[in-house]
Amino acid sequence: MKGRRADQFWLLVLFVLMIVTTVASIRYGAIDFSSHDMAAAVSGKLAGSNDLTLDQRIFIQLRVPRAILCLLVGACLGVGGTLMQALFRNPIVEPGLVGTSSGAAFGAALFYVFGALLKLNLGGWTLPLAACAGGVVSTYIVFALAHTKHEGRSSILRLLLTGLAINALFMSGIGFLSYVARDPQARSIIYWNLGTLSGADWNAVLVVGAATVLGLVPAIAYAKPLNALMIGEEEAVALGVNVVRLKWIILTINVMMVAVATAFTGVISFVGLIVPHILRILRGPDNRFLILGSALLGGTLLSVADLIARVSLRPAELPIGIVTAVVGVPIFVSLLRTREYLS
Amino acid sequence: MLSANNLTFRVGTRALVEDVTASFEPGRLHLIVGANGAGKSTLIKLLTRLMRPHAGTIEYDGANIGGWSERELARRRAVLSQAVEVAFSMPVRELVMMGRYPHFGARPGASDLHICEEVMRYFEVDAMADRSYGTLSGGEKQRVQFARVLAQIWRPIEGAARYLFLDEPLTFLDIRHQIDFMNKVRSFASQPDVVAVGVVHDLSLAARLLMISVCLCINIKKHGWRCSPSRSKSNSLTLFIASNQPSTTLPESLQAISDYL
């Protein structure tokens, strides 16, 4: 079996895997639900019943949106990683590289330290908005600084290095803010930098869901020109790709997906780095497979990590950023060792 | 017919190519030789529109290519660069298929698949079609890249010429494959609808190739560019000599080549 049929088979496998982990993720947690409880809660809600039990309300208002948000955020990070690695032609790139996630973290830190002071209050939206704005602003700074009049061969490299530099700057800004902050705020900043899905609700699902769809559709459409970029910028131009336009489109898609996802969950590292690699080891570097595949696998991996984060210290929970590496590294390293991937 | 009209390209205030006018006819292979820094690769990049000139125009079949879309251009001209670095290794077959990208939408059609098989056989890389590109030797990689580049313009186009450009194509090949490759390129370039222009910096290599073919030198001129007129024994190959020296005498090695011919 080869080519397109094999790709479709693998996508089906990834999809089934995602469904299985999502069901597990809905079922287990601080409280475990039996399949009977779950069916009762869903049918009660669908019937418009107002006298749901407390457990049923926990299920509908917390557990289910959290599981779905987890899938969406994982998908955004996985796709972002695939896009950035393809664009930069570099295997060590993460989706937040162009300043997006450190800027979002800085925005969140500003909110924690000064939010009460400035009496800014947009309810539950304040923190996501602050983070998203931080992510977009910092990415814009990176683009503006990396932009030169002549779009030369080195422009993508310049973008990468400018991204690293601006990331360092924002990390030191976050360090400063958490140093001067008093304890509850300082703890919040640290906690947010490790990522958490505990704030999940249906609003978050809607916003991140829209960003996922809006990013995924054009990303899939640009898979072929991204493939051409694998053999070099100049070669891609020779193959008929408008590289300058491709670059801006891909970066815009990535910023939207990563800034919005990060805004609701905090900084979740590592997923965006390893998901594309795992799929490349299994199926090769064709972006026509990788982009959809990394959406599915990213969602799956983050769901597994979130499940572990919720059940390991029941009824308390771990920040998900602590778990993602613990789940991802063994899979990643063992795959790296068994295949002739980097030869 | 490929025409370059008064091309100038500068980096800062330094002109790498200044006011070059030249034309290249179909049906033969044109080689541009010259010392490092003579502006050969820059000229190739301008002729292929990988870079845009600060002044002057380039015409394919009499039409200015300045306003063509990337894809429109890619269906007509193919470029083999000096060293292609592949970011993520993939099967040879997929890499060769990239040469067909300008010709199909989402998925390759039957003719694209067929052309890939043909070029892989032509460059004798069909036996490694399913191997990962990263595991190949330097020379094998170069041959795979040739196959990819020729796949792009393998079939004639109705009512239009095809343009092939080679920038230092022989770098990683051993002598047997250099000769073999040049023969293949020359036979491809001898088609009446193919305009082929190549750059070779190694004069001894150029001389060796000239022994198996023969050069005819024509019209390249203007500041910093000149041409060595030499006798023609065959019209299959044209040699341009690029120099950044203002003197009008040929360097000795070039004179030796031209004497030999």
Image: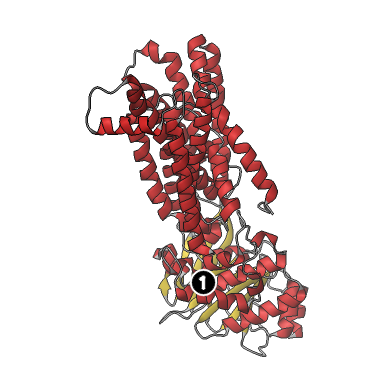
Q: Residue at x 70, y 47 (%)?
A: A337
Q: Residue at x 61, y 73 (%)?
A: B198
Give the camera-side residue of B5 and A309.
A309
Give the camera-side residue of A276 and A164.
A276
Give left or right: position of A50 versus B67.
left
Report the residue that reaches farthest toward the top: A182
| Rendered view: A261 above or below B65 | above
Image location of residue A264, percent across then percent down: 41, 29
| Rendered view: A192 above or below A213 | above
According to the picture, the residue beneath numbered tag 1 turns out to be B152
Q: Quadrant of the C terminus of chain A?
A: bottom right
Image location of residue A127, percent across then percent down: 39, 23
Q: Quadrant of residue B90?
A: bottom right
Image location of residue A196, percent across then percent down: 47, 26
Image location of residue A285, percent across then percent down: 56, 55
| Rendered view: B83 above or below B63 | above
Query: Element type at marker 1?
Result: helix
Q: Quadrant of the N terminus of chain A?
A: bottom right
> Circle 1 marks a residue in which chain?
B
Q: Crowdedness of circle 1 by 10 Å Cα count: few (<14), some, many (20+)?
A: many
Report the residue that reaches farthest toward the bottom: B233
Give left or right: position of B173 versus B28.
right
Q: How is the image coloured?
A: secondary structure
Give the camera-side residue of B128 and A83.
B128
Amino acid carrying label 1: it is: Gln
Q: Residue at x 67, y 90 (%)?
A: B233
Q: Is residue A136 among the parts visible in the rendering?
A: no
Q: Residue at x 64, y 38 (%)?
A: A330
Q: Is residue B77 among the parts visible in the rendering?
A: yes
Q: For the image shown, how many numbered marks are present on the structure?
A: 1
